Image (cartoon, rainbow, N blue to C red):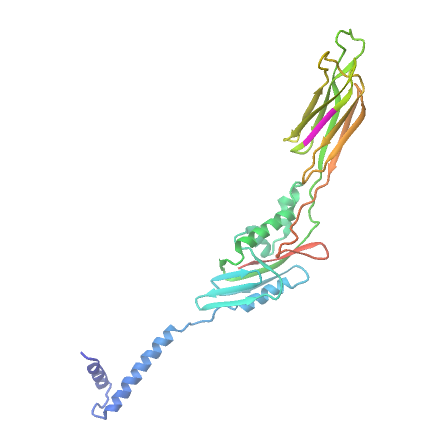
Amino acid sequence: MSVLDFIYRTAANDGMDLETPADAWYTYVAVSIVSVALAGLALGVATGPPPDAPAAANAIEGATGSEYAASATYEHDADRVTVDRRTITMENEHGTAHASFSYGVVVPVNGHERLENLTDGASFEDEYEAELRDGDTHALAVFQDEVETAYDENTGDELVAEGTLHARKVTVDSGIDDLEPLTEATTVEVTETDTLPGEDRIRENIREVELRYDGVEGRAIRFSVEGDYAGSGSFEESRDETFRDGSGTISIEIRSSNLHQPAAEPVEYSAEFAGDDELPERTLTSSSLGIDDVHERDNEIEREADFDRDHPAIGLDDGGNYDVTLVAV
């Protein structure tokens, strides 16, 4: 059946007078075609707006711009959200919207549990309780490392949105946690005595001097002993040791190469402690160590955590507080 036949029958069924002038049913056809076209156009038009990115940006800025710690929540209909330093992009089936922040750099924390908990309102003390209790770990340094990791992993990446945006400016006192000082104990004493070869216990002399160390793993020490032999001549002996496990001994035997003479008391010693990024150099000396002497020295090494004060997302205010704006989408 042709298109004209279809139109003719349709018109007849609708009671149209097909004997009227031809332009009447042409009009009917035109109206029908336009109606179908408009219906198709209506089906292709979006049925809702894209997400309101400016509103989300305003919520974030409300937290960032606060003089003190602050938070904000914004309900949205975005399926995907991208936070890129000072901008936010939100997408759904109806379109994409963009907005920027007037100030502040935002850290998207999706996928980082402790930072997400902070964003939802948890306290720093609760989330980093283990680090705060550990004297060898600085909680603020761990927090900063996690913030930088989240920043590097999420900034500029499209994140799956959950329907609620949480923003929080977290402020942490830089003095909230301190590393406990390192302690090291050193003991030096004569551990063996002897007589001169051929003598029948006329007098005792120093055969061995020992340094005992208990302190810091990896500490390197050069131990030196010098003095006069009990017979004739002088000597100077040194030993190097690195205490990988943080404790151990260095023993120096005094025995001349020809007559195996011991040392006459007293002797002198020195202990040179090598330094590195965490441990300072240190030297112990003594001008008089006799057979019955025990020299004990304790040392305390203050430690400070090293912070990256140049990271774009973390600020340091005049009060000595670190602050950062965290966002979970």
> Does 264 lie within the magenta span?
no
Left or right of 196, for residue 148: left
Query: Which quadrant, please, contains the N terminus?
Result: bottom left
Left or right of 20, for residue 55: right
From the viewer's perspective, is residue 274 above or below residue 256? below
From the viewer's perspective, is residue 256 above or below residue 124? above
The structure residue drawn at horizontal position 72% and vertical position 13%, both measured from the top left corner, is 260
x then y, percent, for residue 212? 71, 26
Q: Of 96 and 261, which appears nearest the observer?
A: 261
x then y, percent, for residue 82? 51, 61
x then y, percent, for residue 303? 70, 42
The structure residue drawn at horizontal position 68% and vertical position 60%, both measured from the top left corner, is 68
Report the magenta residues as a range: 220-224
From the viewer's perspective, is residue 223 above or below residue 54? above
Dominant SS of magenta comes to strand
From the viewer's perspective, is residue 102 above or below residue 157? below
Q: Of 170 and 252, which appears nearest the observer?
A: 252
